[in-house]
Image (cartoon, rainbow, N blue to C red):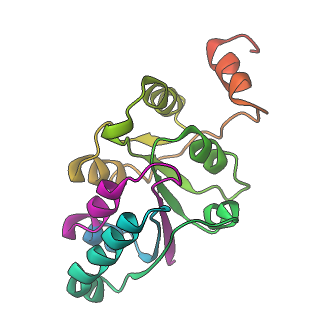
Amino acid sequence: MPYKVLVTTGATYPFDALIELIFTQRVLKKLSALAVTDLRIQYGSTPTSRLAYENCVENCYTVLQSTGINVTGFGITENMASEIRSSWLVISHAGTGTILDTLRSPSPKPRLIVVPNPVLMHGHQAEVAAALEDMNCLLYSKSATEEGIVSALDKLDRQFTELPQQHSLADLVNYEAGVFR
């Protein structure tokens, strides 16, 4: 079965390093081995991020041809929910909004790998991602490295737990703290 992967770097702060990590030969070959046929890159709103994406595609042309992975990119979309719903896997920055949008997506839910942006590592992003990994809802790559992404890709065959249906981040925090159990 062919699979689509959505990589999202966020709309507010550039995360070009995530784009560059995805376009390493090792990650692309791993995605190909997982039967990924389509790679959709949300590179963000800055001209430098678009250029980083375009350079990666150009520099990896031979590897992309050999894997057969079709790559498309976009800056910002009004319909991120549709992008998420149509994906088998989302590889995302550690923004809480994107994490919750992915985990709350209707079934079949995409798998989710969260990669921290080391430039923005505010403690709350890491804490939320780690808590959701502890709940078995997602995979959290604790470092923005090729090894971290490949290691997470190696764990995609496990069964994930659905996020309890909550209405706000506060509800999720209360749930995790045991207030509403």
9 vs 71: above or below: above
Q: Is 120 part of what is drawn in magenta?
A: no
Residue 50: where, in percent of width, then height? 40, 70
Q: Which residues make up the magenta segment?
A: 1-27
What residue is shown at x 67% (from left), y 59% (from top)?
108
Residue 170: where, in percent of width, then height? 71, 22
Q: Nearer the viewer, residue 178 or 95?
A: 95
15 vs 45: above or below: above
Q: Residue furthest front?
A: 47
Q: Is 60 displayed left or right of 16 in the figure? A: left
Residue 158: where, in percent of width, then height? 46, 47
What residue is shown at x 46% (from left), y 25% (from top)?
127
What residue is shown at x 26% (from left), y 71% (from top)?
29
Picture quarter with the C terminus:
top right
What residue is shown at x 61% (from left), y 42% (from top)?
97
Q: Is 20 part of what is drawn in magenta?
A: yes
Q: Nearer the viewer, residue 29 or 93?
A: 93
Residue 167: where, in percent of width, then height? 79, 33
30 vs 114: above or below: below
